[in-house]
Image (cartoon, rainbow, N blue to C red):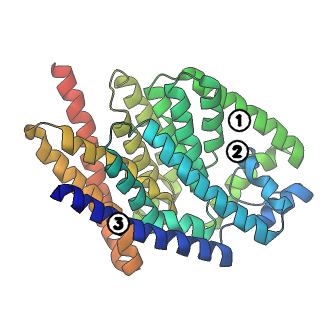
Amino acid sequence: MKSTWVKRAILAVLFIMATVSVVQGINNGMDHPGDFMWKAFRNVMYQRTWGETYIPFTFWMFFPLGLFPETFARTLWIFINIVCTAVSAWALRKTFFRSMEQMEYVALMLIMISGAAWRTNLSNGQYGLPAIAFFFLSVYFTERGKDLPAGLFLALSIYKYQLIVPVAVYYFFKKQYKTIAVAAGVLLLSLIATSIWLGSIYDATIKPLLISQNIGLGDAGDVDIESLLGLGDYIIPLFLIGIALLMMFAYLLRWRKDDLLFVSIGFFVAWALAYNRVYNFFPLIIPLGYSYAKMKSEDLVRIRFYRIEFIGLFLLTASFFWLRTISLEVGVTAERILFYPVFALLLIDLFYYHRLQVSR
């Protein structure tokens, strides 16, 4: 009984924090959503030109926002992001977190919504929430053997390639080659249609990549290798090597059932090897939820490891979600101190189980 009341008290505090976060995110998103590309959407609809960093043949589903007046488009975009949050929560509950207790799962979602990472998506008019919703809808349909909608939603999520592509290696891990083929077909059709609309395949593919490269994002990221070590000239090869290694692990470990661990590591690879700012770190609840569930379920011999892993993930999540709100400098410092040790713990987790399974 006492434990139940403690959980309810924690939920109440998290609910208040999440409510404040939603209100603040909506207010900021209506006032000055700096990353919301309404003018770019308007240009692509009326003048058929595109001058932004997103690759247009993967980003076309948002172009119609340019048909509306700016204030209405902002409001609609905030509504879409909130709906996508609800969709992600629903899809995660139906897939990776189906076994988690309801009260604990609600707490996990409230942790995400209360954090600066999620809120900044609303405040800045960012695009990460729809990508994650599309991806987890794809996982939902994949688990039910529906390759066509799974491939469609996977293709829709790829526009956030620096975050999604490493995680999408999950489909190789699950040997879902039909889903991958459907996604490739959808992207090919999108490429053809967008190239016709813009009048050039160059404008639909290469041009936005060059714009992205020329911006010179420098050390504006949070924990990626480029920001920490100044390896900007090598970041593309490193990113491709990271994807190749993930694909190799997916093949070697294809008989495993640690889906959530593999997806968690995919996110960490994305955060380490590609430019990601705070708004791309709201999926930290995925590895956090994984580690919490393992800590509760594993035997006493291994529970010490999972306690350490969970504490590390919780502190990292708290740094991204809450600490940077109190002090940006302290928060960023904590993130950079914690990120790679926690990443190492997840890798130890992966290969420890691999060795354990082999020994059996």
Q: Position of residue 282 (x, y in %)?
A: 45, 58
- Asked whether, in this view, residue 344 is left or right of residue 64, the answer is left
Q: Which amino acid type is shown beneath numbered disc 3?
A: Ala
Which mark is nearer the camera, 2 or 3? 3
Report the residue marked by disc 1.
Answer: 187
The residue pinned by badge 3 equals 12
SS assignment at label 3 = helix
Q: Earlier in the sequence, mark 2 or mark 3?
A: 3
Q: Is residue 313 visible?
A: yes
Q: Which corner quadrant holds the N terminus?
A: bottom left
- For this rendering, which residue is in front, 135 or 90? 90
Quarter of the figure that contains the C terminus: top left
Q: Give the numbered dot on residue 58.
A: 2
The amino acid on which the numbered mark 1 sits, given as a three-letter code, is Leu
Residue at screen point 53% across, 27% down: 142
Q: Nearer the viewer, mark 3 or mark 1?
A: 3
Q: Is residue 228 above or below residue 179?
A: below
Q: CA distance from mark 2 to mark 3?
A: 40 Å
Question: Which mark is first along the chain, 1 or 3?
Answer: 3
**Could you say where residue 44 lies in the image, as x and y percent from the top left?**
84, 56
Report helix, strand or loop for mark 1: helix
Residue 28 place in picture, x, y as percent:
60, 76
Do the CB atoms of the residues marked 1 and 2 lie less than 8 Å apart?
A: yes
Residue placed at 38% from the left, 37% from the top? Answer: 98
Which residue corresponds to the image point at 22% horizontal and 31% vertical from the top-left? 353
Please state if 245 lies on the left or on the right of 100 as rendered. Answer: right
Q: How busy is the neighbourhood of tag 2: few (under 14 within 10 Å), some, or many (20 plus)? A: many
Mark 2 secondary-structure assignment: helix
Query: Mark 2: which amino acid?
Result: Thr
Label 3: how many residues lie within 10 Å, few (<14), some (14-19) or many (20+)?
Answer: some
Residue 100 marker: none
